[in-house]
Amino acid sequence: MKKLFITKIGGNVIDHPEELRKFVADFAAQPGLKILVHGGGKIASELAHKLGISQALVNGRRITDAETLKVTTMVYAGLLNKQIVALLQASGSNALGLSGADLNCIRTQKRQVEDIDFGFVGDMTEGSVDAGLLATFVDAGIIPVLCSVTHDGRGQLLNTNADTIASALAVSLSDRYEVQLNYCFEKKGVLMDVNNEGSLITRMNKTTYRKLVGEGVIAKGMIPKLDNSFDAITKGVKKVIIGHSADLSKMMTPHENPGTVLVG
Amino acid sequence: MKKLFITKIGGNVIDHPEELRKFVADFAAQPGLKILVHGGGKIASELAHKLGISQALVNGRRITDAETLKVTTMVYAGLLNKQIVALLQASGSNALGLSGADLNCIRTQKRQVEDIDFGFVGDMTEGSVDAGLLATFVDAGIIPVLCSVTHDGRGQLLNTNADTIASALAVSLSDRYEVQLNYCFEKKGVLMDVNNEGSLITRMNKTTYRKLVGEGVIAKGMIPKLDNSFDAITKGVKKVIIGHSADLSKMMTPHENPGTVLVG
């Protein structure tokens, strides 16, 4: 099977034009089949703030109301997605920006209202990803660039977590390719102590992970990402690396293992 | 040759969610090969106003500065493009939203500074459109939905007039298809008297057009659209109709000729 790299980028890199430019150039320079998934950093919340759209919270959980969804769609599917695509094209990479609505490539389900109405949030289901379509693009040398806006197939755009999109793509493509999933962010990887970059966990399997969560060593914010990652590995993804965006080229080089490498 | 309809929608329809929804449903219901090009209506200028971005003007001409380009990209490539795509998908039409940067489908040249620096405006050149790529999508039953954001191939997004994009697409695809170009807006078509919808010019060739321009009968705002249209006809486009968005289904029905039909 051919190798496919699915890379998710978010956080600080997205917020800083120069870092984004550097990251995109790095990404473009790596050989192989690739898909990029991006989040939105702080630009969307800054725009919402400027427009006087208050961050809707219920029991401390973020809500995507109609106005917030508009901002998300503008920033993620518009500004960031097209800037990234234009930068990739400038680096000779034939990128295609996609929301989940485009070619119906990611169809999600509006989150059911139980205790909290999360608003226009789309949850991935078994058949959400059109893996065949994405494989057609990838095999044609095209780099799909996915933002975290999806749709319900009934005309409603929905906000979906970018980490979840990346892992769902990885799983759905793992019977066609040997998939490596790279989560790039602003830390070296998973740290024993969040304030100490020297405390990097270089390798972790599910047993170690459960133990560290039980001991309260793994920071809360990392848990959804790690749950997603181990779930992806269980479902056929070969390798997941969580690491610093500046280490992307190492992540994509065989036998180099920067960041935290997750294994089955 | 197979028939291809290229439809441009802009103005009032874009600004009103219910009208847009109706237009998209109408568009989806028409059989045949189709491409949609959309402008942005007033949403972009309203957003710019809310953000305190002043409309830059030099000698009465609009300038696309860096901040305005961001707003354009957010509204055109993000909000509107994805809303239209999601609505088309809901109508069973397999739409793919594209900026010019995506797959490098429309590469333009930043307008040269002569008397005025128009800022981030991209002008179409001979080789701007990747007609082969668009034909591949169209022949696969996909409906490309193009917004008026293009790129220069060097990482810079650019703002390009949607009417110009529509006519350039029509011309570039006219050796592969029998192309009909539909310009949809909020009037019945080209009027002898802009305030009288009863004064519709139902059919016009280039000679009549020149005569009416000479007599000052054609309103100034219509001239770029009509120049584009006659230029497209000269270069191989079979038929151009300028008409009301509510008349789209008639425009796309053989032997019905609503609006103003332009002929060679």
Image: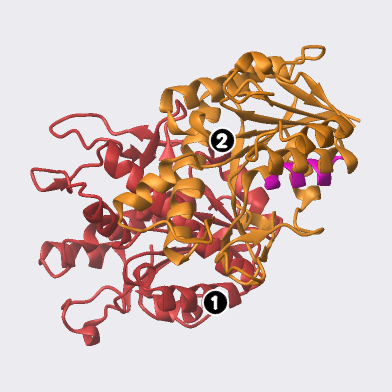
Chain colours: A red, B orange
Q: Residues within 10 Å of mark 1 (few under 14, many from 20)?
A: some
Instruction: Say what amino acid the circle numbered 2 marks.
Output: Gly
Residue A162: assigned label? none
State the residue lying farthest toward the left. A59
Q: Name the residue under label 1.
A: A25
Chain containing the residue with disc 1: A
Q: Does the magenta stretch include residue A32?
A: no
Who's the residue at 16% across and 66% down the image? A219
Q: Kindly identify the residue that appears in the image at 70 percent across and 44 percent down.
A: B224
Image position, residue B219 (x, y; %): 65, 35
Instruction: Please provide percent x and percent y for residue B142.
Output: 68, 35
Q: Can residue A32 be seen in this view?
A: no
- Foreground of the two, B39 or A104: B39
Chain letter of mark 2 equals: B
Is A129 located above or below residue B34 in the figure?
below
Quarter assignment of residue A198 = bottom left
How far across and down, in percent of the image, does residue A237 sit?
A: 47, 57
Q: Distance between the residues labelled 2 and 1?
A: 36 Å
Kindly indicate the quadrant of the structure image that contains residue A206. Answer: bottom left
Q: Label 2: state its secondary structure.
A: loop
Q: Over which residues does the magenta segment extend?
A: B164-174
Residue A171 place in picture, x, y as percent: 47, 50
Q: Is residue A261 visible?
A: yes
| Residue A3, placed above or below residue B134 | below
**Does the magenta portion include B168?**
yes
Kind of residue indicated by mark 1: Ala
* Residues marked 2 and 1 touching at CB (< 8 Å): no
- Considering every residue shown, the one lying at the far bottom of the view is A198
**Is most of the magenta stretch helix, strand or loop?**
helix
The residue beneath circle 2 is: B10
